[in-house]
Amino acid sequence: MSADLSSMKDSVIRSLCKEKIESLEHWLRRLIDDTLTPVYGDYFSHEDASGNRLIKNTLALQVATRRAAEPLRYPRNIDAVLLEDAVDIICKPDLFKNHFFPAMCEAFPDGRDEARTFLKRLLVPRNNLAHANAISARQAEQIICYSNDIIESLKSYYRAMGMQETYDVPLILRVTDSFGNAFTRSQFQPCHDGGIMLMFLDQPQMHLRPGDTLTLELEVDPAYDPNSYSIMWTSTKPWQNAPATGAKVVIPVSNKQVGQQFEVQCRITTNRDWHRMHMGADDFLIMYYKVLPPITQA
């Protein structure tokens, strides 16, 4: 075990390894979806002229079953893909050769077989962590080292891709809330100046009352260093301690927010001296909620 790990408590090592695995899973799911969707559309059901499926039918059925059981946790098919599934998709010979090698080449310059060998080594410790079973010191090192190498390769790839965009700025990719929902950028509606929005005004299960606490958390494109931008939350009906900063905001709902429309705004602003949007930000999110009067009020 490395000197750094040897000085850590087992609980700390397990927490670090879980964090690394979860981050790796996120990156691999993102790579799959970003790469295959523009080419094949619904790639989980895509078949070629000969009837050959891009994604094997057994996996497509497993994904459908997971989504049916937990629709809020898995809003898209790709969200229900586990690490072992992602490895199988990425390391499918034709897909790796035709689509995924450019993103993985920094970590695996020797190609698909090398990628499959190292990724497969993470499956057993990943499952052990998920089921509260022990992992060895060597497995912990593999999780940390392999995950870091792969993620750095993907970051380099996305940075290169970003340089090809007109505006190379961090965007909001995902939002989760205290209702148990998870929303990806594709589920949002476009709003002014290139931002995104969601409206829950006609959804009773999303209505709030004074005394409730609304929690929102962003996932910003991880290809960008979090220190290179700021996140600010605000509203025209500000809550206590608003405006707030950071990826996560906790909003205590009070009488001040009561009304047919309570909007929560979030701005992503880079440290640069230019910005994508006219408002002086680089990405913008607005979410609309209805706040009902206190139950005790006449």
Image (tube, helix red, strand yellow):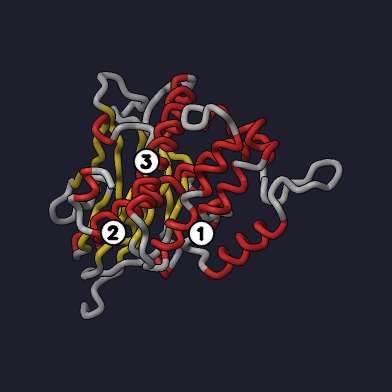
Which residue matches tag 1? 74
Give the mark, 1 or 2, whose residue is nearer the N terminus: 1
Which residue matches tag 2? 215
Residue at image position (52%, 55%) is 82
Location of residue 24 in the rendering, given as x and y in whole percent from the top left corner: 43, 45
Label count reads 3
Viewer-closest of 30 and 176: 30
Location of residue 45 in the rendering, given as x and y in whole percent from the top left corner: 71, 51
- Nearest to the eye among marks 1 and 2: give it: 1
Image disc number at residue 145: 3
Check if mark 3's residue and mark 2's residue have beta carbons within 8 Å.
Answer: no
Viewer-closest of 120 and 93: 120
* Label 1 SS: loop
Give the mark, 3 or 1, whose residue is nearer the N terminus: 1
User: What quarter of the picture does the C terminus occupy?
Assistant: bottom left
Outermost residue, left side: 241
Image disc number at residue 163: none
Residue at image position (25%, 68%) is 212
Location of residue 31 in the rendering, given as x and y in whole percent from the top left corner: 52, 39
Location of residue 52 in the rendering, given as x and y in whole percent from the top left corner: 80, 46
Q: On the picture, is 50 further left or further right than 296?
A: right
Viewer-closest of 227 and 206: 227
Mark 3 vs mark 1, CA separation in Å: 28 Å
Q: On the picture, is 246 further left or further right than 127?
A: left
Mark 3 vs mark 2, CA separation in Å: 33 Å
Check if mark 3's residue and mark 1's residue have beta carbons within 8 Å.
Answer: no
Residue at image position (42%, 43%) is 173
* Label 3 SS: helix
The three-letter amino acid code for the residue at tag 2 is: Thr
Above or below for 86 versus 251: above
